[in-house]
Image: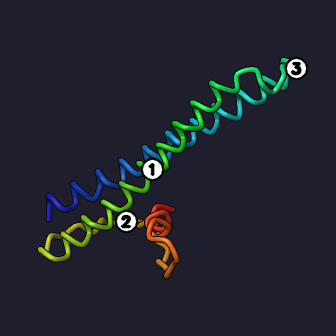
């Protein structure tokens, strides 16, 4: 039970950290775009840098999906081996996965 709870807490901490990183990158993109407009610079100014930052955001989204899939896998392992992992207190609401035409959309659905 102790190990399961520790792992569950760390999964949640990791998921929240990824979300926070994505939020900060989104703020960076917004601030950079607003700064370009405020400075009255052409759209091409800083375009390569913006593309790099957006690529980083996309990679964070991939990490988020992988951690969410791992979360689901760990809960299955815990259930299969009778490892207690349920946390006390308020839990996060989860969406009910729906059938989809693409396999990855299910992972993204769980990540949301």
Residue furthest to the bottom in view is 99
Q: Which residue is identified by label 3?
A: 40
Which residue is disc 2 drawn over?
89
Q: Earlier in the sequence, mark 3 or mark 1?
A: 3
Q: Which residue is mark 1?
A: 62
Q: Residues within 10 Å of mark 1 (few under 14, many from 20)?
A: few
Residue 108 x %, y %: 48, 63
Q: Secondary structure at mark 2?
A: loop
Q: Name which quarter of the figure residue 110 lies in.
A: bottom left
Q: Quarter of the image for the N terminus: give it.
A: bottom left
Q: Are marks 3 and 1 in contact (CB under 8 Å)?
A: no
Which secondary structure lies at badge 3? loop
**Mark closer to the chain start, 3 or 2:** 3
- Categorize mark 2 by other alpha carbons within 10 Å: few (<14), some (14-19), many (20+): few
- Mark 3 Cα shell of 10 Å, populated few (<14), some (14-19), many (≥20): few
Name the spot of residue 27 as percent of width and height, x first.
Answer: 64, 35
């Amino acid at each position: 039970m102790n190990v399961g709870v520790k792992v569950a807490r760390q999964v949640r901490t990791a998921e929240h950290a990824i979300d926070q990183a994505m939020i900060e990158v989104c703020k960076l993109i917004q601030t950079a775009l607003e700064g370009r407009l405020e400075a009255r610079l052409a759209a091409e100014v800083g375009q390569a840098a913006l593309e790099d930052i957006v690529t980083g955001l996309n990679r964070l989204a991939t990490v988020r999906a992988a951690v969410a899939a791992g979360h689901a896998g760990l809960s299955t392992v815990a259930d299969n081996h009778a490892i207690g992992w349920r946390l006390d207190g308020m839990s996060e609401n989860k969406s009910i996965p729906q059938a989809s035409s693409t396999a990855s959309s299910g992972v993204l659905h769980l990540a949301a």
